[in-house]
Amino acid sequence: MAFWNRRRSIDAMIAGHEGERLKATLSWPHLLALGVGAIVGTGILTLIGVGAGLAGPAVLVSFGLAGLVCLCAALAYAELSTMMPAAGSAYAYSYAVLGELAAWVIGWSLILEYSLVVSAVAVGWSGYAVGFLSGLGIDVPLALAAGPHAGGIVNLPAVAIIGVVTGLLLLGTRESATLNAVLVVIKIAALVAFVVLALPHFEQAHFTPFMPNGFGAPFVQTGVMAAAAIIFFAFYGFDAISTAAEETKKPERDLAIGIVGSMLICTVLYMVVAAVAIGARPVADFADSPEPLALILRQIGQGGWAQVIAAAAVIALPTVLLAFLFGQSRIFLGMARDGLLPRRLAKVSSRGVPAVVT
């Protein structure tokens, strides 16, 4: 059979690889936390303002539509990951169905995608961290806070946080997943705190007119659909859960709970935060703001809490890095096992993690 059409059977995937097996230590709470940690990132902190600028109060509908579209993809991932509980996610599924060439292309596409996400989030985290330190009177030199393209030499905070998260992953899957769950709780607590603080200032009049730019304006440059297209990126990350299939104790049950559950939790959370934000202040006050939630808190006289939420973002944002670095290493592992990368990269450490590719 030609290499481009060569396939791996589902039974072979499930059987695993002796001597290279990852430890099955995760249950559905870990997977839920992994999914929520991957999804809830800078998007909710910034895209509410951008979306509101395009759709007005109807950004609520945009969040719902974006969540619905992502839920369809999440259901597909849930079905496939329970059928083929092997490290590799979409790479493994395509190998079984489409053949080796398609799997090779998809595998490298996923690796590139995850690398770009990690790089972008690390740089974003660096910006939050440098800004937070500046607020405390600690100034980081530009040469160490930005890359050459931005007038610096090296973005040291971004490099450092990637190194720290990589070290956590090397400690073991369960250990890193447990810490991730703690950070996710901090992240959600910060959003809940925003809701509690802003809710007393809620005014229904801020929702009128509800859809000032229509559902889809000409060329879809403004309106509900334009906002939904941008907000879609705030839901990205649930697919990282499927890369943990081999390390899940009960994949036939827990993977579906983790993938679909994290999507539902994030959709509801996003819509509640957006509704309270719009109710607390008119859309015009925070539309297009790079930090809408912090701006709203300052406008309602809660400047101190705005700094607390910024601190929570700095502490908890690395969960996004953890989820995508975790997923990327499992895709590398799957490709190395299949011979599409050097097999020595598939080495599993005594802690049950793919140490070389991590």
Image (spheres, rainbow, N blue to C red):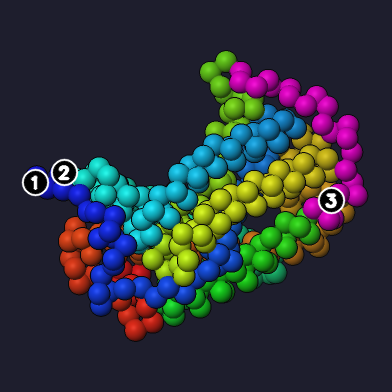
The outermost residue toward the left is 1
Q: Hey, which quadrant is residue 71 in on the image?
A: top right
Q: Is residue 286 left or right of residue 133?
A: right
- Can residue 150 be seen in the rendering of this structure? no
Q: Which amino acid does label 2 sit on?
A: Asn
Q: Which residue is drawn at 84% across and 55% down?
A: 197
Q: Is mark 1 on a helix, strand or loop?
A: loop
Q: What residue type is labelled 1?
A: Met
* Labelled disc at residue 5: 2
Looking at the image, is mark 3 or mark 1 earlier in the sequence? 1
Looking at the image, is mark 3 or mark 2 earlier in the sequence? 2
Q: Name the residue under label 1.
A: 1
Query: Marks 1 and 2: CB-CB under 8 Å?
Result: yes
Which one is nearer the viewer's eye here, 357 or 126? 357
Q: In which quarter of the image is the C terminus?
A: bottom left
Q: Residue at x 71, y 43 (%)?
A: 271
Q: Give the range drawn in magenta.
A: 195-217
* Labelled disc at residue 38: none
Q: Is residue 128 left or right of residue 80?
A: right
Q: Where is residue 342 in the image (x, y as percent from the top left)?
A: 18, 65
Q: What element carries label 3?
A: helix
Numbered disc in front, either 3 or 2: 2
Q: Name the residue under label 3.
A: 198
